[in-house]
Image (cartoon, rainbow, N blue to C red):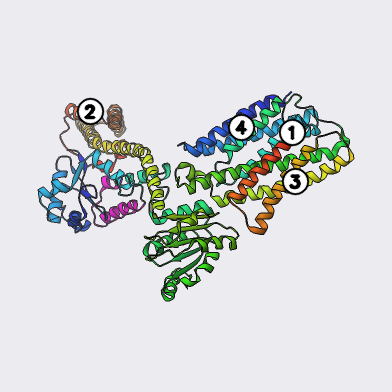
Amino acid sequence: MLATPVAVCGVVAWSAVAAVATADLVGDGRRTLRVARALSGLAAALTLGAALAVAVVEGPSTLFGAGAAALTLAAFVSVGALALGRRASMRGVNALVGVLGAVLLALFLLAPSSVSGPRDHTQTLLYTHVGLVLSGVGAFALAAITSILLLVQERQLRARQFGRLFQRLPSLEELDAASFRLVVWGFVAYTTALALGFVWLSRADDGRSPLRAVLAVVAWATFAAVIHTRITMGWRGRRAAWMTIAGCAVAFSVLAGYVGP
Amino acid sequence: MSRAVAMIGASHRSAPVEERERLAALDAAAVVAALDGGGVEEAALLSTCNRVELYLVGPDAETLPAARALIAAQAGVDRDWLDRFTYQAVGHDAVRHLLRVSSSLDSLVLGEPQILGQVKDAFAASQRAGGAGPILHRTFHQAFHAAKRVRTETRIAESAVSVSYAAVELAKKVFGSLTGKCVLVIGAGKMGTLALRHLTAAGATRVLVANRNRDRAIDAAVAFGGTGHGLDELDALLDEADIVISSTGSQHMIVRFEAVRAATVRRRYRPLFLIDIAVPRDIDPRCDSLPNVYLFDVDDLEKVVDENLKARRAEANRAEAIIHEECEQLQGWLAQGEVVPTIVSLRHKLNALKDAEVARLVRENPGLPPEAHEAAERMARALVNKILHEPTLSLRNSAQTGHHGAMVTAVRSLFDLNDTPGSAPGDGPVEATE
C-alpha cells in the first residue's frame, strides 16, 4: 500500500519539524525558522499525499473510516498549520504542530486495519458527520496549540523572563486572536457535525456507547462557552486559553478508539 | 618606503569626559591644513561625544609620531597627557580599530546605530577639507561596508537597549502591532515623554495626557496631537487607554488597584499595559495580578535592556569574524598598492631597454624599411610583455597572501630598481594589472 511508506516519511518529517521549530524557539540557529517552515511544508505535503493515496486506492469514504481517521485529522491539521504558518508572527506554532502531526500519523500506521473504512455509500450522512468532526477537531487542536503558546508567553511576561523564548514567541493578542478564530471555525464545523450525528443516530441504532455522544456535547458546550463569554463578557487571554485546551482535550477523548489503534 | 594608516585617539574607555573635552577643539579643516609640508598625506578626524580619533596616512615609521605631534599641537596637550589618556595603533591594528568603531563594537552601547553616521560625517568632513586621499577613501568605505554587514548579518542591532524603547518592545509583546492603540501618559516627565515618542513612532495614534494641573496636561498633549485631562478623570481614561505610562513625582499611588480592577471589567478584559517609571511608584503593584493587565516598573524595563545587551554581546563574536574578513580584504588591497610601484618600475625599466634597443637597431641600419622597423618594435614589445607577465603575477599574488615584502625586495634588487615611479599605492591595483 502506497500510503504506508508516505505516512512513515510524514512521521519523520513532522518529528523533524517539531525538533527544528523547538530549536528555533530556544536555540541560536540563524536559519532554523526558514528550515522549520520548509520542513512543515514537506510534512504537510506528505500527509496530504498519504491521504490522497488512501482515497485513490481504497476510495474517498475510507478516509472517514475508523482506520484512516487519524490520517484525515492529520491532513486537516496540516492544512490549518500551513494557513497559520503564512503569518510571519506565528513563530513557534510548528513546534507543537510537529508533535501532533507525528503522533496522528503514527496512530494511523498503528491502526489494525488502517484503510478498512466503511464503503457503504448509503452512509453519506455518517461520512459527512465524521469529516466535519475531524475538521472541527483539527481547528480545535490548532486553537489549543496557540492557547498553549499564549500561556507560555504570558508566563514569560509575568515572570519577567525576557530571554530568547520570550523574544521569539508571538505576542499575546496575536495568539489570542488566532486561537479565537480557530475556535469559531471549529465550532461551526463541530456544531454541524453534531447535528448530523444526532440525525444519523436517530436513524440507525448501531449500539454505540452514549458516552461518546455525551462527551461530544460537553466538548461542544465548552467551545460554546468560549465563544459566548468572549462575545458577552470579553473573556480572553489566560481564561479563554484554558477553556480552549480543556475543550480540545474532551473533543479528542470523543475520538479515542475511533482514531488510531 | 610604504605608507600606512595610523590612528591616535581618546574614547570613553581611555579617558574621562573632562579629559576628552580637551580634544573637542580639534577641527578636521585645521588638522588637514596642518599637514602641509609634512610626510603625512591624508587625514580624517572622527569626533563624537564618546570619542575623538585622528586617522592619518603617511610613511610607515613617521605617521604615528606625526599624529601625536599634530594632536599635541592642535589640542595643547603634552606627551604625558597623550601617554595617559590616548591609545594609538598603526597599520592593520589602526584599520581594524576603525572597522570595529564603525560597526559599533567599540561603542558604549554595543550595536548602537548612530556611530556609522558619525563616521560617515567624519569622512565627508575630511573630503571637504581635502584630507581624504585614496587610502583613507578605501579604508573608510571598507569600514562602511563592514558596518553594514555587521548590521545585516548579525543580530547585534536587534532589540531595545534603552529603558524607554524597552517599554515599546514589551508593549509589542502584548499587542503585536501598536497601530491605533491609545496611550495614556500620567504626569509629563522626561522619561514618560520619551517613551510616548517611541510609542507614537511605533504606531500608537491616540494620546491622552493626565496631570494634576490640567493646563500643563493640555500643553503636553498638544505636541502629540492628543488631549489633556486632570487626574480626577483617571478612572474614565483607564477605560479608553491600551497603554498607560506613569511618571509623576507623587509620593502616593496615583493608579489604584480597585480602579484598575473595575476598569478591566468595563474594558471587557481588553489587555491593559501599564508602565510605572516613577520612583516612588505611581501604580499599585497588585494590578499585575489582574487578568490581562500587565504592569512593569523601571527595574523590569532595565531587565529587558540587560537581556538585550546580553544577546548583543553574544552576537559580537560573529561581528568580530566579519571585521576580520573585511580587514583581510582591505589589507590585501593595501598590499597590492605596495607592489604597484615595483611593477610600474619594472615595466618602465624593461620598456626603456626595449626603446633603446629598437633605436639602436634603427641607428645601425639606416636603410631599414619602415615595415622591418615596425616588426622589430612589435617583437620587442611582445618580448617585454612575455617577460613581465610572470613577475607581475607573482608580485600580485604575493600581495594577496601578505608575503610581498621579500618578493618586492628581490625584484628591486635583481632588476636594480632604485627609482620610485609616481604611482601611488592608493591608486590601487588597477594600474598594476594594465
Question: Left or right of A192: which side holds B217?
Answer: left
Disc 3 marks which amino acid? Ala
Q: Residue at x 25, y 38 (%)?
A: B92
Q: Position of residue B249 (x, y in %)?
A: 37, 65
Question: Left or right of B361: which side holds A238?
Answer: right
Instruction: State which tag comes first along the sequence, 3 or 1.
Output: 1
Q: Nearer the viewer, mark 2 or mark 4?
A: 4
**Which mark is drawn over residue B407?**
2
* Residue wearing tag 4: A14
Instruction: Give the spatial CA distance, label 1 vs label 2.
Output: 77 Å
Q: Position of residue B299 (x, y in %)?
A: 39, 52
The quarter of the image holding the N terminus of chain B is top left
- What chain is tagged by disc 3? A
Disc 1 marks which amino acid? Ala
Give the crowd class for mark 3: few <14, some 14-19, many >=20 residues within 10 Å: many
Instruction: Give the spatial CA distance, label 3 vs label 2.
Output: 81 Å
* Residue wearing tag 1: A69
Per the image, label 4 sits on a secondary structure element best described as helix
Disc 2 marks which amino acid? Met
Instruction: State which tag comes first along the sequence, 3 or 4.
Output: 4
User: Where are the magenta residues, as a range?
Assistant: B113-138
Instruction: Give the spatial CA distance, label 3 vs label 4.
Output: 26 Å
* Residue wearing tag 3: A189
Instruction: Give the spatial CA distance, label 4 vs label 1.
Output: 18 Å
Question: Left or right of A2: which side holds B75?
Answer: left
> Which quadrant would residue B31 be assigned to in this image?
bottom left
Per the image, label 2 sits on a secondary structure element best described as helix
**Which mark is drawn over residue B279?**
none
The quarter of the image holding the C terminus of chain B is top left
